[in-house]
Amino acid sequence: MAVIHRTTMKPGKLELLAGWLPARPWYAGASAAPDLARAGGFRIDDPEGEVGIEFMVVTDSSGAGPVAYLVPLTYRGAPLEGAEEGLIGTSEHGVLGTRWIYDGAHDPVLTGRLLALLRGEAAPQHQSETGVPDPTVVPETAEDALPGGAAVVGVEDGPEGTRLVVEAGGRRLGLELLRVLEAGRTVPGALGRVTAGWELPDGTRPRGAFAVLREG
């Protein structure tokens, strides 16, 4: 079970993300200096207790209207070999020391736990409370869509978001991380999805798909 520490991180997550987001191919803002705020998310526990896993939502208010982004993050106590492309930055944690923070799409621990969540083998946890499940996060998957041996074998970043290439029982599937969130987004024909909510600057709380599993 992940322990949520009430402490500082320097630089903070929003500061690191403000420098990282504008270079993403799916960044929808016009400003090179986004005005970010925390807007929600959830966590999944790493069974080994080594890697922090957070599906974070931030809103950018630098443009004409707020844009909500999904940023899955992992927190590690040492660099992840071969994941240099996914490194967002390092931060000094007030309890744990130096943490290497990655875009979780490039971290096999996060992608493995996301598949487990879709299979019903992992439970979403509250973003900021230790040991508290988050029932507002709803994973759904068609029967037998994700057998136990399913694994992420590739990552494709593009203007529409991030596609995780999944090999599952001799089939190839696409697990899409919907980086720019939209309220009430429906996905016809999806084999599975993770739906959750976030908060906009005006206090409204939309819900929509965070991740979608498709054929091909």
Image (cartoon, helix red, strand yellow):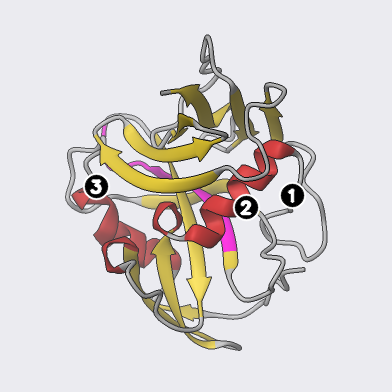
Image spot of residue 144 (x, y percent): 69, 26
Badges 3 and 2: C-beta atoms under 8 Å apart? no
Q: CA distance from mark 1 to mark 2?
A: 7 Å
- For residue 25, side relative to residue 16 (left or right): left
Position of residue 154 relative to residue 204, above or below, is: below
Q: Residue at x 61, y 32 (%)?
A: 194
Position of residue 11 relative to residue 64, above or below, is: below
Image spot of residue 133 (x, y percent): 81, 51
Residue sitting nearer the eye, 127 or 36: 127
Q: Picture quarter containing residue 68?
A: top left
Q: Earlier in the sequence, mark 1 or mark 2?
A: 2
In the rendered structure, find residue 113 and report the number of the disc placed on it: 2
Q: Which residue is mark 3?
A: 24
Q: Which residue is mark 1?
A: 122
In magenta, the rendered stretch is 53-63
Residue sitting nearer the eye, 21 or 35: 21
Residue sitting nearer the eye, 214 or 136: 214
Is residue 201 visible in this depiction of the protein? no
Q: Earlier in the sequence, mark 1 or mark 3?
A: 3
**Callout in the foreground (1, 3):** 1
Q: Quadrant of the N terminus?
A: bottom right
Q: Earlier in the sequence, mark 3 or mark 2?
A: 3
Label 1 Cα neighbours within 10 Å, binned few <14 / some 14-19 / many ≥20: some
Badges 1 and 2: C-beta atoms under 8 Å apart? yes
